[in-house]
Image (cartoon, grey):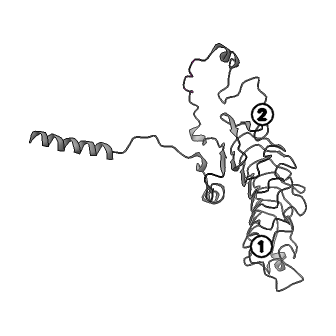
Amino acid sequence: MKALARLIVGLVLLDAAVTAPTLESINYDSETYDATLEDLDHLYNYENIPVGRAEMEIATVMPSGNRELLTPPPQPEKAEEEEEEESTPRLIDGSSPQEPEFTGVLGPQTNEGQVHQGWTVMTFTCLFLKTNTAYFYSRFNRIKKINKNDFASLNDLRRIDLTSNLISEIDEDAFRKLPQLRELVLRGNKIRQLPELPTTLRFIDISNNRLGRKGIKQEAFKDMYDLHHLYLTDNNLDHIPLPLPENLRALHLQNNNILEMHEDTFCNVKNLTYIRKALEDIRLDGNPINLSKTPQAYMCLPRLPIGSLV
């Protein structure tokens, strides 16, 4: 009987140990830290990624509340030759005093064309971009320029997100030859001039930059038949970039310097029966334009634009 009782007690203790929760540290996802609900819909959607075929490269730094740099674990002793090669003192962000700052997205390219070195706020990162990379994220870093060959040969690339960097210059051919690019997010940079963009784009966000009168090419969006969302808020635009694609659903131009609008900006003045069904979201608030002066410009729209009426 004692043996049976001990066996029962042992089974109970074993079951309790198995079902007890494990004590693991909480891993906060820096991708969504301090993000608004509106941003989550567009910037952090990882759905429809074909597993096994598409690759995703992410180089986003930790949120400001968690930027305590920890001392790296001790490395095993190496041969004397390797120690001589690594004798240059390293800074806490991974750089060294003698190393130049690489302003491009991926830094200098190696002979093989596969390994790239890119500067981030915290670390010096080696990115292995495979040719089937489809989603590239590098937010909150120090990137200053997008070079011609930064995304060369990435024919499967569908989304680029370089939010909150220091980008002020983009090569004219940086994006033009990407046949599958669908979404381009460059908000929160210092961009004054947009390069030629591929006509395959469906989502564009160049908000909070420095685009002015000549910042967008004439008819830049004309042939983008699948473009649904165009966000150009918080720039210095003084006009609405025309013509707009017929399938455009959302046009956000808040906080610019737009002064006037014509009757044919959205509608066809020669066809009074024309209705532009897709364009339901137009934001012009924060501009010095009086929308009440051009009522004919909205007759074909399903909803009136948001903006000042006085």
Q: Give the percent coordinates (x, y) of residue 218.
A: 91, 61
Q: Position of residue 243 (x, y in %)?
A: 86, 68
Residue 75 highlighted magenta (yes or no): yes
Question: Is 88 above or below relative to 146?
Answer: above
Q: Secondary structure at mark 2?
A: loop
Residue, x 47% and y 43% (percent of image)? 26
* Labels 1 & 2 near each other (Cβ < 8 A): no
Where is 207 relative to 79, above or below?
A: below
Residue 279, located in which quarter of the rendered image? Answer: bottom right
Residue 107 left/right relative to 6: right
Which residues are drawn in magenta?
71-77
Q: Residue furthest left?
A: 1
In the rendered image, the quadrant that contains the C terminus is: bottom right
Placement of the N terminus among the 4 image quadrants: top left
Q: Amino acid at mark 2?
A: Thr
Where residue 9 appears, x then y in whole percent?
18, 42
Residue identifier under label 2: 110
Task: Determine whether the residue tagged by mark 1 lies in a helix, strand or loop.
Answer: loop
Q: Depth check: 47 or 216 in front?
A: 47
* Dominant SS in magenta: loop
Name which residue type carries label 1: Leu
The residue that appears at 77% across and 73% down in the rendered structure is: 309
Image location of residue 292, percent across then percent down = 80, 76
**What residue do we see at 77% from left, 71% from top?**
247
Magenta segment: does it hold 146? no
Given residues 249 and 196, the one toward you in this image is 196
Q: Nearer the viewer, mark 1 or mark 2?
A: 2
Q: Is residue 176 above or below residue 166?
A: below
Question: Residue 309: which disc?
Answer: 1
Count neighbours of disc 1 (C-alpha within 10 A) and say few if under 14, some if 14 to 19, many if 20 or more: few
Q: Give the mark nearest the N terminus, 1 or 2.
A: 2
